[in-house]
Image (spheres, grey):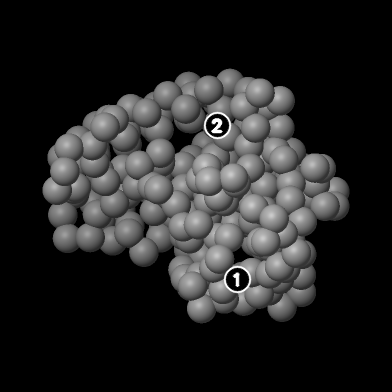
Amino acid sequence: MTAPVDLAVSPVERALFVPDADALVIADIHLGRAAASSVDAPIADGADSCERLESLLSRTEPSTVVVAGDLLHAFHRVPRGVERDLAALEAAVEAAGASLVVTPGNHDTMLEDVFDGNAAAAYRLADGETVVCHGHERPEMDAARYVIGHDHPALSIEGRKRPCFLYGPNASEGADVIVCPAFTTLAAGATVNGMRARDFQSPLVADPDSFHPAVWDDSSEEALWFPPLGACRRFL
């Protein structure tokens, strides 16, 4: 299963690399989710995200890292440990020689309290074609391709749930849309197999049947693409 078209992007483990823009995009890190939970989290979410980001930075060597929203998991207060974890993440990006950009999501209401770096509602990558935003609202910036997060897509394959990317050609007023999975491993993900348009929270996903899912395969270290959801639901 190969990419349906030449996307000029490369899905990697829970992230998207855009070679023409020399940019790495991750979404939905949700720093503080474990601390804000009413149950003990199985992992230290900040440390885990930072370690995996460091691995991706080493493999892709981007000049820019863009967070497609929900860097934080904070509404009314900043959960304990978030500032420490955010500092570690920023240090990892800086050590890799990259710049960090955040496009705030609906969970980032406290972002200004802890992040004084580059933040914008939507960010156009250096390729001039791609705009990154969280996806909870329709962006005002026109683009040939939108890369978003927000819905935490996952695909159930033979009973196993796996985070997935969704690629919708011409999905939003003629623009392509790529939905990234949640970068945090604490997000179970929304199983897209049976989801219809009304089940997606992003206004950029109007016809999920036209979106191609892709999952990352650790053994081959490549993304495995599936036919559009409308054609493959009954086979999964």
Q: Where is residue 67 in the image (x, y as percent from the top left)?
A: 48, 47
Residue 190 in percent (x, y) is at 46, 57
Residue 99 visible in the current orientation:
yes
Q: Nearer the viewer, mark 1 or mark 2?
A: 1
Is residue 188 shown left or right of residue 191? left
* Relative to 126, 35 lies left or right: left
Which image quadrant: the N terminus? top right
Report the side of 160 relative to 115 (left or right): right
The image quadrant of residue 86 is top left
Is label 1 in a helix, a strand or a loop? Answer: loop
Q: Residue at point 56% right, 73% down?
A: 196
The answer to whether one can see residue 112 in this image is no
- Circle 1 residue: 205
Q: Is residue 118 above or below residue 191?
A: above
In the rendered image, residue 191, in percent from the top left (x then y), is placed at 50, 57
Dot 1 crowding, Cα within 10 Å, few <14, some 14–19, many 20+ = many
Residue placed at 34% from the left, 47% from the top? 30
163 relative position to 232: left or right = left
Residue 10 coordinates in the image, percent (x, y): 71, 40
Looking at the picture, tell me which residue is in the foreground, 226 or 47: 226
Front in this rendered view, residue 153 or 65: 153
Amino acid at circle 1: Val
* Label 2 neighbour load within 10 Å: few <14, some 14-19, many 20+: some
What's the distance in space between the residues labelled 1 and 2, CA to CA? Answer: 31 Å
Residue 98 got which mark?
A: 2
Q: Give the residue type at disc 2.
A: Ala
Label 2 secondary element = loop
Q: Which of 50 and 12 is in front in this view?
A: 12
Give me the disc on residue 183: none
Sequence-wise first label, 1 or 2: 2
Picture residue at 63% right of the left edge, 42% below the top: 215
Q: Which of 218 and 86 is in front in this view?
A: 218
